[in-house]
């Protein structure tokens, strides 16, 4: 490659995309690239856009960014631009047609091809478009440049078997493919051995984990097995689907101390009629019964959700039903979205699209209600001592208040005063909540405890992980250990 080339990655969308970007960074650094300083997009030799197709106007955002880089690239011979992710999987050759200065387009199933595609584009002096229709190599077998020394993502599956009418993900990520439990646990064990305190298990529908290898109880077993891994202190997961949420998972959450008392459970709508049109395969009563079961076993669990307002055909009574469920559920917080048609989804062609002004008005009412509930929920924590894992991006001191920030075990954001303690991102502190706002908690008193960690020692260092990991663990309920990762060709179940 001659002189060292630099790269910058811009990521849009969900945690799965952010995790994929860590893999892309690891691949590029393994191929000899170095990370550009700062934002890097205007100065890097290679700029990679890892795109999302879920949000409204995702394509306009991408082409706007590509347009900004067109004159930059024209002035810098040798600069390359690559586009990957869900929008690339969907639009394919359209990207090169609309932005012919793009060098590489790759899909969700072949992120491992990026370094080779960049080299081929340079050699052939022509754009390279490679979109695979199915997964060949599980992304977790690829090297990664992790953004955090104290927290890591671990994919347990990719793809989705659901057919929600508003969602384009299954057509872009494909059918669900599950990793073998031994491979997942080997990766978690390797992260913990490297000083990681918190792991988030990722899947489009984590509750259906195990279906592809014939064990419908695999997710609950996986949570329990994570509790046996030395050094691991926190486990989170996202996202579950109410249809597949079962009592064994609730029991595993309650019985396994490392599993955090937090649950993100998408509601989408509180109207049974709208849920039916969405093809969500559960109804409001079933949803609320799950929350009741969770709270019976985990009384302090912080439950969050996703809600779509203004889905086609939603009437005022449908929306009132959503408000009723929100009042009953008393979510700690909610990600609320105004429905907008997504090309390629069945919902985009449904009749009775709700007028934008009506959607906005309903959205404002929902946000106002949820803000009130979130504030009420947070105020119940005033006076309570909480354990906080100090965050990297949120963990820098605020100059005006001298506060740092982190996440409590239930996922709530906590701003606290470190006092004279030399607290670093990745350290763990105990502090007492003195004030509550709708979206955060404040602890302005002295620390009750401060524990320095290996992750805190490394908080300023880039963390690069290779494919090597301990052999699969032979834990109860899972049968014999899996083969070592290095001996596998794909790392995924077929």
Image (cartoon, helix red, strand yellow):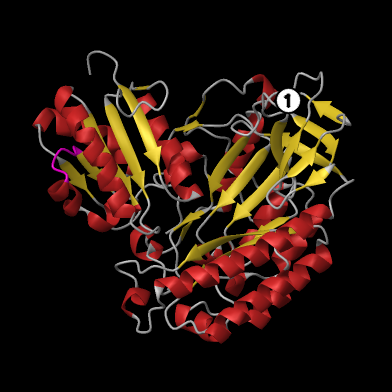
Answer yes or no: is residue 310 visible: no
**Residue under the image location 55 percent in, 45 percent down:** 154
As for residue 100 lying within the magenta part, the answer is: yes
Q: Which residue is mark 1?
A: 402
Answer yes or no: is residue 89 visible: yes
Quadrant in the picture for residue 100:
top left
Give percent across and percent down for residue 159: 43, 60
Q: If the image is split into quadrants, where does the C terminus sit?
A: bottom left
**Residue under the image location 30 percent in, 26 percent down:** 42
Quadrant in the picture for residue 405:
top right
The local crowd at label 1, few if under 14, some if 14 to 19, many if 20 or more residues have their Cα within 10 Å, is some
288 to 431, vertically: above or below: below
Q: If the image is split into quadrants, where does the N terminus sit?
A: top left
As for residue 344 lying within the magenta part, the answer is: no
31 to 142, vertically: above or below: above
What secondary structure prevails in the magenta region? loop
Give percent across and percent down for residue 83: 28, 43
Q: Nearer the viewer, residue 324 or 185?
A: 324
The number of callouts visible is 1
**Residue under the image location 78 percent in, 26 percent down:** 418
Quadrant in the picture for residue 118:
top left
Q: Is residue 122 left or right of residue 136?
A: left
Q: Which residues are magenta?
A: 99-103
Q: Nearer the viewer, residue 210 or 237?
A: 237
């Amino acid at each position: 490659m001659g002189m060292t080339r630099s790269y910058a990655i811009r990521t849009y969308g969900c945690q799965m995309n952010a995790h994929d970007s860590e893999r892309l960074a690891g691949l590029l650094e393994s191929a000899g690239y170095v990370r550009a300083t700062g934002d890097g997009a205007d100065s890097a030799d290679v700029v990679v856009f890892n795109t999302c197709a879920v949000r409204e106007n995702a394509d306009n955002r991408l082409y706007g960014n590509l347009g900004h880089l067109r004159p930059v690239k024209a002035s810098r011979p040798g600069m390359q631009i690559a586009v990957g992710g869900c929008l690339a999987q969907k639009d394919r050759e359209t990207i090169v047609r609309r932005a012919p200065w793009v060098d590489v387009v790759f899909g969700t199933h072949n992120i491992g091809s990026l370094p080779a595609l960049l080299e081929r584009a340079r050699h052939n002096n022509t754009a390279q478009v490679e979109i695979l229709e199915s997964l060949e190599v599980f992304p977790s077998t690829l090297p990664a440049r992790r953004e955090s020394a104290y927290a890591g993502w671990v994919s347990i599956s990719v793809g989705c078997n659901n057919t929600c009418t508003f969602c384009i993900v299954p057509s872009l990520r494909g059918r669900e493919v599950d990793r073998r439990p031994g491979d997942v646990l080997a990766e978690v064990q390797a992260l913990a051995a490297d000083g990681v305190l918190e792991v988030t298990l990722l899947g489009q529908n984590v509750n259906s984990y195990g279906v592809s290898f014939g064990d419908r109880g695999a997710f609950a077993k996986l949570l329990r097995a994570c509790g046996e891994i030395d050094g691991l202190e926190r486990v989170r997961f996202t996202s579950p689907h109410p249809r597949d949420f079962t009592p064994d998972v609730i029991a595993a959450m309650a019985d396994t101390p490392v599993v955090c008392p937090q649950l993100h459970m998408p509601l989408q709508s509180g109207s049974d009629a709208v849920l039916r049109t969405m093809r969500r395969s559960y109804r409001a009563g079933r949803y609320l019964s799950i929350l009741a079961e969770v709270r019976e076993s985990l009384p302090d669990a912080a439950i969050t959700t996703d809600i779509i307002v203004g889905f086609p055909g939603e009437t005022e009574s449908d929306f009132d039903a959503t408000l009723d469920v929100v009042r009953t559920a008393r979510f700690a917080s909610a990600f609320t979205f105004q429905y907008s048609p997504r090309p390629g989804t069945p919902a985009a062609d449904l009749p009775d699209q709700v007028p934008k002004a009506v959607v906005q008005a309903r959205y404002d009412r929902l946000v106002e209600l949820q803000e009130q509930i979130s504030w009420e929920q947070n105020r119940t924590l005033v006076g309570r001592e909480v354990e906080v894992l100090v965050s990297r991006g949120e963990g820098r001191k605020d100059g005006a208040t001298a506060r740092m920030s982190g996440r409590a075990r239930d996922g709530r954001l906590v701003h606290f005063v470190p006092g004279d303690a030399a607290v670093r991102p990745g350290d763990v502190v105990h502090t007492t909540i003195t004030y509550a706002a709708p979206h955060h908690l404040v602890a302005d008193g002295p620390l009750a405890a401060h524990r320095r960690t290996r992750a805190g020692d490394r908080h300023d260092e880039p963390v690069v992980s290779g494919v090597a990991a301990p052999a699969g663990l032979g834990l109860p309920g899972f049968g014999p250990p899996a083969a070592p990762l290095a001996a596998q060709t794909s790392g995924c179940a077929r």
